[in-house]
Image: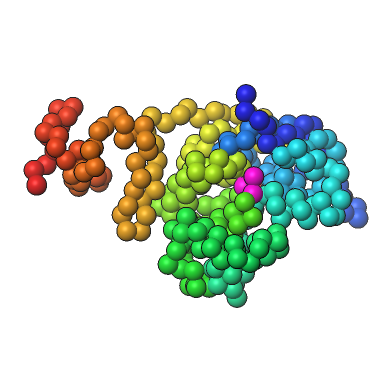
Amino acid sequence: MAELLVESANLVKIYKSADLEVVALQGLDLHVPRGEMLALVGPSGAGKSTLLNILGGLDEPSAGRCSVAGIDLSRLSGRERIYYRRRIVGHVWQQTSRNLFSDLTLLDNVLAPMVLAGYPSSLRRKRARRLLELVGLGDRVGYRPDRLSGGEQQRGALAVALANEPQLLLADEPTGELDSVTAREVLLLLRQLNAELNLTTVIVTHDQMVASAMDRSVAIRDGRTSTEVVHAEEAEETVIIDGVGRLQIPRPLLEAVPFGGRARVHLAGDHIELWPAGLPERNGHTPPRQ
Ligand SMILES: Nc1ncnc2c1ncn2[C@@H]1O[C@H](COP(=O)(O)OP(=O)(O)OP(=O)(O)O)[C@@H](O)[C@H]1O
Ligand SMILES: [Mg+2]
């Protein structure tokens, strides 16, 4: 079995104010193996953001166990908490405006967590540019957030969240403010990051399309985990197509269809077909003549 990155058992969070106690989590259990993409779903007020804030080291559990990468989050000193937040987790908030500093360029936004985490300056710039390229914003490095679309801002937020090489990426409704096409783009990117970096990802979502794109979804109800759905592996794979139309075909698919270095591309209504350049016929379909 894969190593567990997140282990929480019987987790309790009580918010206390002068005359009120809110039990936000009441004995929640959650285990996340390293490399998994997990969706947290559940009604409003169920405790999803509370859990994410605890996993992100922003809030302390009131009782129970919670550890990430072997670090016990219930007994962090101030110093350890800072280390944890700067080096172990990346966080994307639902509100796009909370993720990026509005008066900094995209590049400076990505550099900031690296400065805090103490990366050597010689490395920072190179790494920031590489991350922005990875999220498809290589040509936007000098832009401030107000010149970016909602989807671009959330992709920028992902680059910021990844700047400190986190072991765990937390995202609270990362697609909540996006239209479905842009949401899909962000999801594809999350998948790509998961595949390339074996990045463990926990996202909160209300959107069934988003939840079913994850490996597993766990429903939270009244501060406890209730049901869990493991999504069957898709027979087809999702790949990223960059801004100039390049795509990388996964090796198993490439091995299944020997292209020999050249392909014919055919627009077929609402989708595109790729045919090995020399292949006359396959599965009853005839590739278009060129
Ligand atoms: N800082 C706080 N102080 C007091 N109560 C809080 C605080 N944060 C959350 N709560 C309460 O804890 C419960 C769980 O809230 P939480 O934000 O985790 O829900 P959620 O599942 O994220 O909901 P939503 O889907 O609406 O974002 C709610 O009853 C909420 O009012
Ligand atoms: Mg919430």
Residue 111 position by quadrant: bottom right
Judging depth in this view, the residue of 121 and 188 nearest the camera is 121
Reply above or below: 79 against 258: below
List x then y, in percent, for residue 211: 53, 39
Residue 173 visible somewhere in the drawing: yes
Give x and y (percent) for residue 16: 87, 50
Please state, as top left, top right, bottom left or bottom right, where the N terminus lies in the image. Answer: top right
Q: Main secondary structure of the magenta part?
A: strand
The colour style of the image is rainbow
Nearer to us in this view, 25 or 148 = 148
Front residue of 57/253: it is: 253
Q: Is residue 89 left or right of residue 138?
A: right
Q: Position of residue 65 (x, y in %)?
A: 81, 35
Say which residue appears at 39% left-offset and 48% top-offset: 240
- Residue pushed farthest front? 122
Q: Residue furthest left?
A: 289
Which residue corresponds to the image point at 51% horizontal and 46% vertical from the top-left? 193
The quadrant holding residue 108 is bottom right
Tell which of 232 and 2 is nearer to you: 2
Q: Is residue 123 left or right of residue 61?
A: left
Residues drawn in magenta: 166-170
Q: Is residue 216 left or right of residue 84?
A: left
State left or right for residue 158 relative to residue 263: right
Residue 51: x and y, percent?
A: 72, 43
Numbered-mark total? 0
Q: Quadrant of residue 162?
A: bottom right
Q: Is residue 27 visible?
A: no
The stretch drawn in magenta includes residue 167: yes
Residue 235 is one of the magenta-drawn residues: no
